[in-house]
Amino acid sequence: MAEATLTWPKNYNEVPKAAFTRADLYADEIKRIFHGAEWHPIAHESELPNPGDFKTMRLAGIPLLISRDEAGVVRVFYNACSHRSNQLETAVMGNKTEFECPYHRWLFNAKGDLVGCPNQREFLPGFDKADYPLGQPRFELFFGLIFVTFSSETEPLETFLGEAGETLRELMAGDGRLKLLGYQKVRYDSNWKGYNDNDGYHAPLLHAAFKMLNWQGGKGRQYTCTRRGHVCFESALSVASGPSVLKDKDLIAFKGQDPSVGSRIVQLFPTFVSTKHLDVINLRFATPIDAETTEVHYAYFAHQDDDDEMLRHRLRQSSNLLGPCGLISMEDASIFHRIHIGSHTPGNAIFQKGVRDPSKLESEFLQNDESGNLPRWEYYRSVMGFERAEA
Amino acid sequence: MTLSAVELEATLDRLLLADANALDSKDMQGWLANYAEEDQASYYCRAAENTENNLKLGFMFDDCRERLEDRVTYVNEIWVGTFQDYRTRHFVQRIGHRQVDKNTAEVVSNFSVFMTPQDTGVTQVLAAGQYLDTVRLSDNGSAKLLSRRAELDTSVLPRYLVYPI
């Protein structure tokens, strides 16, 4: 089958709207990007803090099982029996040190070893349980954040992250010693790129809340790094002052340390967005469901050293501030849907804010520049093999 | 005032229906008026999946009267004009209740909520789950929500939420 083609505009600040909407590109994106040479965060190990804890999820259709064994070692497996590939575990999370496939009663331990299967004498001659552990994708941990890749070609995780690694470490409380508070999960009616193009980047004009809370944007920096165009924001925290329309001011209070860089966002190609804002630590694990749908699991965290009061504050702030119903983010979610609908029109999306020369790509931006997304688009174009039009 | 069993059931059902009606009418002041005027009046909306795993985080975590009042402000003032509006229809069915004392009852009810976005006009299920309510019964025979936990079977929402469930 011929691979999908799309002619890209000559200017770096233009993105064909067809990239968001053409269903025939989607299968190629899954192959080249989601099953290709990229790292994908799928969980933080603090989501499974105890021996025997596990989590399951699907990434671009691939079922995954993350488990912590009795000795505390975390591993990632395909969530499929090594016999006939029956889905092994159906719970989203739980605690088990053994996983039994009900189909033919194959039993695996939390290390992925096949430890039992009935009626072996009827199997192929020479059958050996040691040849049938659970399959595993490549995975690596970065301060507890678990990444997988389905390609043997992907460079080491540290290279993939580049300078974004440092901002990501800081975002995860500096040491990755997190404590899970819970999830908000949602499906957006948006192509995964429409979600990704608009989640990290925030136009403050959208947020009426900022104005009503007397909340001015803090001074900060936006930069991109690596050839993938990962986007990082580091901003001084601006805490609302003066009169507020809110009666419970704790929703927008900052009780942590270091307001000089109190706000961070790290957005990794292709879909991961993470943010630390006020006292909210939020990792967003996103996956395409189909060309028109993206599922996002917002996981929220405290720090392991938090006292009870801080824990309670983070819980109250995290639930109401930043997710699909959050005070300052519900309208982002609406934009994901509306961008997707509006992109079913001819022509290109033309980025303006922060673009100085459309024939060049830059890597340093002002906090609210939309041009920070452009290096990522250039990487997408190159991975997909789309030709840029001649000048 | 001591209510008979039948009177208590009728009182509780009036409250459940008043809340469904306020939400489906997008009447946030009416929604607020269904809650007791006590500091600890609360509304939580959370995936049951979180609760079952001892995770307290919710989609909405309004653990005091001030936060209930702030939620009215979100919808009526802060978010106006920023989202694709949608209609809802709440179907609520009381499945159990227990009178704890003269002024307090606990009620469990099932709910399902349909939504119809303004732009598409296509109706779909927004969420299903249970309300776990603590109800304040007053001496004049009225009932208000002291605490409501909307525990959602729907752990993955099909859409962002503007209005409480």
Image (cartoon, rainbow, N blue to C red):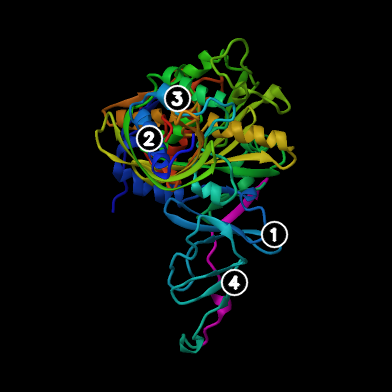
Q: Could you tell me which residue is drawn at 62 percent across and 39 percent down?
A: A162
Q: Which residue is mark 1?
A: A72
Q: Which residue is mark 2?
A: B14
Q: Could you tell me which residue is drawn at 57 percent across and 43 percent down?
A: A182
Q: Which residue is mark 4?
A: A113
Q: Are marks 3 and 2 in contact (CB under 8 Å)?
A: no
Instruction: Please name whichever residue, B86 or B13, is drawn nearer the observer in this view of the structure.
Output: B13
In the orientation shown, which residue stands out farthest toward the left?
B121
Secondary structure found at label 3: helix
Instruction: Please name whichever residue, A298 or B144, is drawn nearer the observer in this view of the structure.
Output: B144
Q: Amino acid at mark 4?
A: Asp
Q: Chain of mark 3?
A: B
Q: Are marks 1 and 4 in contact (CB under 8 Å)?
A: no
Q: Which residue is mark 3?
A: B33
Which of discs 1 and 4 lies nearer the camera? The answer is: 1
Q: CA distance from mark 2 to mark 4?
A: 57 Å
Q: CA distance from mark 3 to mark 4?
A: 58 Å
Disc 2 with disc 4 on a shared chain = no
Secondary structure found at label 4: loop
